[in-house]
Image: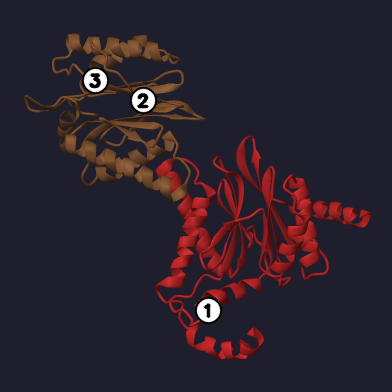
Chain colours: A red, B brown
């Protein structure tokens, strides 16, 4: 049924997609869906929960040798001492939201003198994103986030939010390119009792199977962990050497299997 | 500057609040009189508001500001509970309260001095002293009102950090006796509330 009406829907869609504030007759918000389409063409990011931390991994593509890499990552950001974020989508949009998330976290700490619970931060950012699907006639943000963090209420947590302003908590999830295949691999391979080291290995496995590039190197991958060090949350972005070691360890395992 | 100086005498009130932390509880006592000039309007006033299940907020000062501000804090904490499903620690609640006082200070200050006491599973008992100029101090024992001049020196001498409930009540009784003997404008009756791991409880009237 969908097949036959597909070309028809396409034509119909044109009338309803110029402004976010309009529903289509089928009850869809096309601009929001188009934003999610934009993200599914972006570079991948994966988040997986471990017993003693959260792991974020991302594909990074260096488009030109002339690009000066600089110190800042394009995919992973620290929101507060206890929350970090992986990004997939339009980088410029991501910057705005990361700024906003950082403000939210500090405003909370200013008022309550303690770190903001992760879910509340996620809700704050999502409420902003939702506003862009309902008022103002502005387009939605073309970014999906993976929030990784630790708080005293629920320990280590992983959340995913999308342009519609929806969010959910996950044990393992993927955003960006090839996310559906990454998600299905995670579904098969994820176990509740893996520690950070094992989860890093799992992330490598998933990326190896889903990434478009033929080879995985420290040049086109980023990894970060959020763990407790001396009882305090600590965000660690793996260095190039650590990534190379990680990839080597996991190639050997693959050949053993 | 003069305005604030003037306020100092206005806000140091006839209400008495005494609070301290015990071994695994926090106790706060407040006098029960609400007076206007020489007339006692109400001799059964409860000046200690229950916040959530594990905190007490006692206020002294201008009657309207006290009840308005305490109510405001209580309702905001309720809203937090409904929005987030996680409880707010006593420390966070104290800082939130202080923040509200600080914001109002440069527009229309709340003329109330507060004692906020609570019991958290992880932190144990705690007591916070807040005044109308939005200062905040975590303390083992504290008092508000003119009575503090009498009570604090007594507590300096006799307070111990690991009091049991009976010892705490005895200490409070000594405070009330001291006030009865030496404080000119003293109320004979006090409402006493204690908060521990089981929640908030009122302690029967101590007669001095």
Residue nearest the viewer, comparing B3 with A155? A155
Residue at image point 58% right, 68% down: A91
Furthest-right residue in this view: A256
Residue nearest the viewer, comparing B6 with B206? B206
Chain ID at mark 1: A
Crowd around label 3: few <14 · some 14–19 · many ≥20 (10 Å): many
Residue A52 visible in the shown view: yes
Chain ID at mark 2: B
Q: Which residue is mark 2?
A: B201
**Residue A30's mark?**
1
Q: Is residue A71 above or below residue A108?
A: below
Closer to viewer: mark 1 or mark 2:
2
Res. B90 image quadrant: top left
Quadrant for the N terminus of chain A in the image: bottom right
On the image, the x and y values in percent for residue B37 come to: 7, 27
On the image, the x and y values in percent for residue A151 come to: 56, 43
Q: Is residue A61 above or below residue A238?
A: below
Establish whether labels 1 and 2 are both on one chain.
no
Residue at image point 46% right, 18% down: B23
Q: Which residue is mark 3?
A: B190
Cα gap from disc 1 to disc 2, whole angstroms: 56 Å
Res. A72 image quadrant: bottom right
The number of callouts visible is 3
Q: Could you say whether the residue bearing mark 1 is in a helix, strand or loop?
A: helix
Crowd around label 1: few <14 · some 14–19 · many ≥20 (10 Å): many
Residue at image point 92% right, 57% down: A255
Q: Could you say whether the residue bearing mark 3 is in a helix, strand or loop?
A: strand
Residue B60 located left or right of residue A237:
left
Cβ atoms at labels 3 and 2 below 8 Å apart: no
């Amino acid at each position: 049924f969908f097949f036959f009406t597909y070309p028809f829907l396409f034509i119909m869609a044109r009338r309803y997609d110029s402004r976010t504030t309009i529903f289509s007759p089928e009850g869809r918000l096309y601009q929001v869906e188009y934003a999610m389409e934009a993200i599914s063409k972006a570079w991948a990011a994966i988040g997986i929960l471990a017993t003693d931390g959260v792991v974020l991994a991302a594909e990074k593509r260096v488009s030109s040798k002339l690009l000066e890499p600089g110190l800042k990552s394009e995919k992973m950001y620290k929101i507060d001492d206890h929350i970090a974020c992986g990004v997939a989508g339009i980088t410029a949009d991501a910057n705005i939201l990361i700024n906003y998330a950082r403000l939210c976290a500090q405003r909370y700490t200013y008022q309550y003198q303690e770190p903001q619970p992760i879910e509340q931060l996620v809700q704050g950012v999502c409420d902003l994103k939702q506003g862009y699907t309902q008022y103002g006639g502005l387009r939605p943000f073309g970014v999906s986030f993976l929030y990784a963090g630790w708080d005293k209420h629920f320990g280590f947590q992983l959340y995913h939010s999308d342009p519609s302003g929806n969010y959910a908590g996950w044990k393992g999830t993927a955003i960006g390119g090839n996310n559906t295949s990454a998600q299905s691999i995670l579904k098969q391979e994820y176990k509740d009792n893996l520690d950070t080291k094992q989860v890093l290995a799992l992330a490598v496995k998933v990326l190896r199977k889903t990434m478009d590039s033929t080879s995985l190197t420290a040049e086109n991958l980023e990894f970060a962990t959020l763990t407790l060090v001396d009882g305090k949350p600590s965000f660690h972005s793996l260095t190039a050497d650590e990534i190379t070691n990680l990839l080597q360890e996991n190639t050997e395992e693959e050949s053993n299997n | 500057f003069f305005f604030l100086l003037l306020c100092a005498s206005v806000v140091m009130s006839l209400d008495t609040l005494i609070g301290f932390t015990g071994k695994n509880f926090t106790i706060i006592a407040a006098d029960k009189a609400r007076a206007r000039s020489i007339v006692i309007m109400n001799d059964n006033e409860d000046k200690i508001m229950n916040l959530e299940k594990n905190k007490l907020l006692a206020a002294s000062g201008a009657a309207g500001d006290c009840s308005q501000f305490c109510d405001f804090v209580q309702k905001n904490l309720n809203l937090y509970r409904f929005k987030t499903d996680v409880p707010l620690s006593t420390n966070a609640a104290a800082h939130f309260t202080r923040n509200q006082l600080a914001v109002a200070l440069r527009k229309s200050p709340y003329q109330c001095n507060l004692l906020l006491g609570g019991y958290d599973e992880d932190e144990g008992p705690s007591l916070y002293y807040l005044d109308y100029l939005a200062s905040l101090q975590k303390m083992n024992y504290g008092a508000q009102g003119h009575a503090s001049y009498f009570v604090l020196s007594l507590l300096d001498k006799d307070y111990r950090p690991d009091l049991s409930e009976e010892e705490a009540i005895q200490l409070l009784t000594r405070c009330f006796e001291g006030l009865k003997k030496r404080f000119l404008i003293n109320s004979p009756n006090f409402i006493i509330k204690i908060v521990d791991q089981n929640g908030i409880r009122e302690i029967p009237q101590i007669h001095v």
